[in-house]
Image: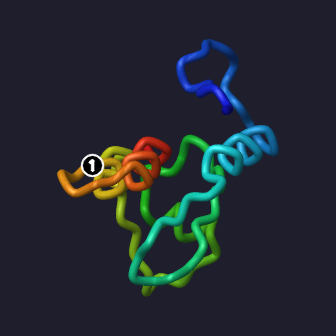
Amino acid sequence: MRKSKKNLPGPPLVGNELFKSIGEACEGLIYISETDAPVLPFVLGDDTTKDDIVLEKLGSKAAHSVETYSLEEFFNRLTKKREWFGPAEIAMADKFA
């Protein structure tokens, strides 16, 4: 059983270390969405507050839009435990949390 590292102090992860950590944390998880596309992590830096900058850095056309969500909003439906959850669903919600 792997112990969670989210509460340990230390320098922030960058580059390949960050992607490796995200990959390990997401192992076995599936984020179900309408697009049926993979979720790929990326780092844009501190200038990600403007939608047009995000689209430009991603190489997207102006016809696209950017939606911003907090982590809590993005994962809420996957971390919320329901009355009907069995052990497998509880374990999955805990892993997403």
At x 66%, y 26%, the residue is 12
At x 71%, y 31%, the residue is 13
Q: Which residue bears the numbered disc 1?
A: 80
Circle 1 packing at 10 Å, graded few (<14), some (14-19), many (20+), is: few
Q: What x and y, as percent, mark residue 70?
A: 35, 47
Q: Is residue 88 left or right of residue 83?
A: right
- In the image, is residue 80 above or below residue 17? below
Q: Is residue 31 left or right of residue 11?
A: left
The answer to which quarter of the image holds residue 41 is bottom right
Q: Is residue 92 left or right of residue 67?
A: right
Residue occupying the far left of the picture: 83
At x 60%, y 73%, the residue is 38
- In the image, is residue 53 above or below residue 48? below
At x 29%, y 57%, the residue is 77
Residue closer to the observer: 50 or 14? 14
Q: What x and y, as percent, mark residue 49?
A: 43, 50
Q: What x and y, as percent, mark residue 68?
A: 36, 57
Q: Amino acid at mark 1?
A: Lys
Q: How is the image coloured?
A: rainbow
Residue occupying the far front of the picture: 86
Residue closer to the observer: 20 or 63? 20
Q: What x and y, as percent, mark residue 45?
A: 61, 44
- Quarter of the image for the C terminus: give it: top left
Name the element at disc 1: loop
Residue closer to the observer: 12 or 63? 12
- Quarter of the image for the N terminus: give it: top right
